Amino acid sequence: MTHTIGIIGDGQLALMLADSFKKREQAFFCFSENENSSMELLYPQQTLKDAQLFRESCDVFTLENEFHTVQELEELLLNKKQTLFPNLSSYGHFSNKIFQRQLFQKLEIPSPIWMEVRDPDLTKIYESGLSFPFIVKAPAGGYDGKGVRVVRNPSDFNSVADDFGLYHGKSLLVEEMISIKKELAQGFVRSEDGSFTLLPLVETVQVNGICQYVYHPAPVSQDIQKQIEEILKKLMKAPLVGIFNFEFFLDDRERVFINEGAPRPHNSQHLTMDASTFSQFDLVAMYLTPQEKIPSKLETKSSAMINILGRSEGKEYSLRLPEISSNISVHTKLYGKNKCAFGRKMGHVNLVDENQTSNLREIALKIFKEYHI
């Protein structure tokens, strides 16, 4: 059966989903309320601004972000034949960071000590086992370090509480600050019938709250890999249906804690676009229109990804990379954004070491230091 897929969102993740759909000659539309989005600029014929037309034109829907309420998505589905990937019950756990923590707690998955805060009474926070410094998060809407603060004293807390709307009726997520040795990420794609594909385990490196590098394979022991596999098994049995990516903390005592999850493709898996037989975006297409044999595990070559952030301002821009060793393959993906801005995600570079003979970390660092856009 042929489906028309609706992409809810219009940024770079939607763009890369669209690229995967296009190469499979898969019909799709994207809903956009923004002018000059990446999708509108590169796929103008497939970008719709009329919500009703978008709903009526698509059979199945998928997401590029989790900034929608469950009620909004329920209204999107016109009838029982239309479906959402991830399904609504799975998505509901990830539309709010507090809901995520509740799910992890129910599944007995190790996570930082946390509590939901509804008033500025620090006594309740202390009684939960938390002490300064701790982390405060806005339960919804945060990304790339936004909506997350380190709080070191009562004055910091009052300032963050005000900024995040605690005094205007919003609750906050307060959680333990983990002593992080490494940050890791892994996820899976899973269908209603229980079949799944495991995405590669990678190491991520954050700079100012934004993922700057990703490396595969992740330099961790088999014991650490097993801890993460056991966590993913619990999440799959929850059961979650859709594509899900999870971030993990490895502390200095070799303990794994789950940080956050996303019900969509994720920056940490962009290297699958060039280092794997199928990318995370290909897998979404394959699960939505099952015509190809789908692997249970995504085999991935030695690789690295570098996020390209804007280093200039203006509508005219191009990417310049330093000279790089010919022993590796270099793949550049720009997101077609209408203008460059400082700190804005403009694209990424994937490095693939076919022969596993190069120092990818050294090369990634060189690119990060010397690229210009």
Image (cartoon, helix red, strand yellow):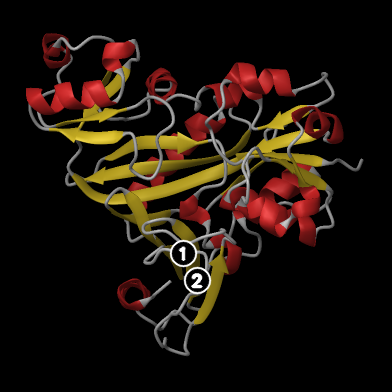
Q: Is residue 144 left or right of residue 19?
A: left
Identify the residue at image location x=40%, y=26%.
Answer: 97
Where is residue 277? Give x, y as percent: 65, 65
Helix or strand or loop: what does disc 1 sit on? loop
User: Alpha-carbon neighbours of circle 2 within 10 Å: few (<14), some, or many (≥20)?
Assistant: some
| Residue 48 x, y percent position in the rendering | 76, 41
User: Along the horizontal axis of the image, is 325 left or right of 83?
Assistant: left
Rounded to the nearest angstrom, the CA distance separating label 1 from label 2 is 7 Å
Question: The C terminus is located in which quarter?
Answer: bottom left
1 and 2 marks in contact (CB < 8 Å): yes
Residue picked out by circle 1: 314
The residue where tag 2 is placed is 317
**Pick the front one: 341 or 175:** 341
Above or below residue 207? Residue 106 is above
Report the amino acid beneath label 1.
Answer: Gly
Give the quadrant of the N terminus: top right
The image shows residue 175 at horizontal and vertical percentages of: 24, 26
SS for dot 2 = loop
